[in-house]
Amino acid sequence: GFGIVALEASSAESVVVTTGIEGIKEAIKNNKNGLVVPENNPAEYTRVIVKMLKNKEKRKAFGRKARRYTLEQYDWQVITEQYIDVFQ
């Protein structure tokens, strides 16, 4: 599938921390609308989550950045215009 839940979370200014699994890697771009950690690395996953939890300012700023990026790339108006361009 496609990472629609991850996109919904990033559009709500939540920090998405994920691995590069199928579906998610197409939707979440590292340091743009989420944080991608290596697969099978629970220590790194934990480190990134704890880092965000401990720093409210950074978490909020990243959430705002993620929302902007997600809306610029995946807003239905943007997607509709891309489809129209393909079919013209």
Image (cartoon, rainbow, N blue to C red):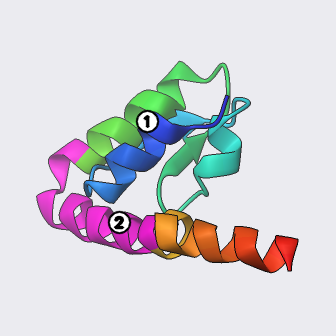
Q: Which amino acid does label 2 sit on?
A: Arg
Whole-percent x, y for residue 15 in the image: 33, 49
Residue 65's disc number: none
Instruction: Tell me which residue sits at (50%, 39%) in the image.
Output: 4
The mark that comes first in sequence, 2 or 1, is 1
| Residue 24 visible here | yes
Magenta part of the chain = 53-71
Instruction: Tell me which residue sits at (79%, 79%) in the image.
Output: 85
Instruction: Tell me which residue sits at (34%, 45%) in the image.
Output: 9
Quarter holding the N terminus? Answer: top right
Q: What element carries label 1?
A: helix
| Number of dots carrying numbers | 2
Quarter holding the C terminus? Answer: bottom right
Question: Left or right: where does residue 5 sit relative to residue 15?
Answer: right
Residue that numbered label 1 is attached to: 5
Residue that numbered label 2 is attached to: 67
Q: How far, Cα to Cα, is label 2 from label 1? A: 13 Å
Question: Left or right: where does residue 43 sit relative to residue 29?
Answer: left
Whole-percent x, y for residue 53 in the image: 20, 43
- Front-lying residue, 30 or 5: 5
CB within 8 Å, label 2 to label 1: no
Neighbor class of circle 2 (other Cα within 10 Å; few <14, some 14-19, many 20+) is: many
Whole-percent x, y for residue 42 in the image: 52, 20
Is residue 60 on the magenta stretch?
yes
| Residue 75 visible here | no
Whole-percent x, y for residue 70 in the image: 46, 64
- Figure check: 14 above or below 22: below
- Front-lying residue, 17 or 26: 26
Q: Which amino acid does label 1 sit on?
A: Val
Q: Is mark 2 on a helix, strand or loop?
A: helix
Q: Place residue 17 in its image quadrant.
A: top left
- Figure check: 26 above or below 29: above
